[in-house]
Amino acid sequence: MAQHILGVILARGGSQGLPGKNALPLAGRPVIEWTIQAARAARLLDDICLTSDMRAALQSACEHDIAIIERPADLATHQAAVDATVRHAVETYEREHATPTHIAILYGNVPVRPDGVIDRAIECLLRTRADSVRSMSPVGKFHPDWMHRMDGDRLTPLRENSIHRRQDLEPLFYHDGAVVVVTRAALFGASNDDPHAFFGTDRRGVLSNGYVVDIDTEMDLKLAGAILSDRCLETAEAVAAGANR
């Protein structure tokens, strides 16, 4: 089968934390359009589709000439599994387009991701022939060695230690949501009883190397807006400087 890499953008309409977040205005455009822009900029994606139950998100996809997948109600709840939603999108896409060999999963509520991270994740997957690659960021100050359980006001360390310098913490990383890339075989070979099964058995990671903002709250929206506004200003200043040379 010829290689075909499909980007699948997820944009569910409901949100318990911030209703309709994918369509909220952010630095001059709807939240979802920042992910559409990132997908369009990825040179290794052969095609892109967007799956959603939101009219506004589907309209944005149409305006950017991206294939739309109307998500059924049972896959638009907060209990719906990511892998089931992506499988539905891929199967629907395949009816009119090519059969993808690899799928890049992009969350529509992640408007801030470093340039190039989608391509780097795809390159890692192709190079290693792994089942999946996820973008990762350092846990930083929220390290398990500095976490405690609270029983009333009584503290119990999550992991017993006496580490007080950040430099002495074990390097640990979390999936930041910028991108997940999987093989079609891993996605469709997953069991239904394990929500992580679609990552396969050979799971890899790439460092995002920059800010990633996953919008779940009003504060996340404000943070993303500040970062994106700064980027737009820097771009405008660079263009102006070039024009004045």
Image (cartoon, grey):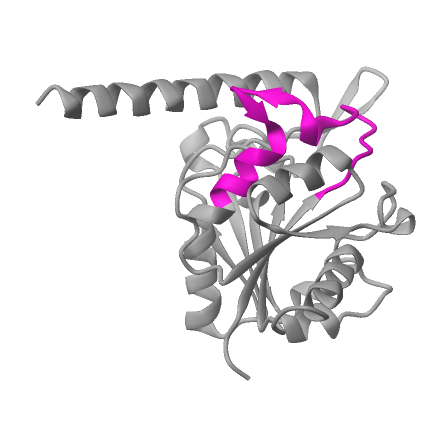
Q: In this view, does 41 lie to the left or right of 55?
A: left
| Between 150 and 8, the one nearer to me in the picture | 8
**Most distant residue in the right direction:** 74
Q: Is residue 191 left or right of residue 117?
A: right
User: Residue 232 location in percent, x, y?
Assistant: 39, 22
User: Residue 21 location in percent, x, y?
Assistant: 71, 27
User: Residue 162 location in percent, x, y?
Assistant: 55, 31
**Most distant residue in the bottom direction:** 1
Residue at 57% from the left image edge and 35% from the top image edge: 33
Is 17 included in the stretch rendered in magenta? yes
Identify the magenta region: 11-38
Q: Quadrant of residue 177?
A: top right
Residue at 66% from the left image edge and 63% from the top image edge: 199
Is residue 139 in view? Answer: no
Residue at 61% from the left image edge and 72% from the top image edge: 98
Is 36 included in the stretch rendered in magenta? yes
On-image quarter of the C terminus: top left
**44 is higher (above) or lower (below) than 30:** below
On-image quarter of the N terminus: bottom right
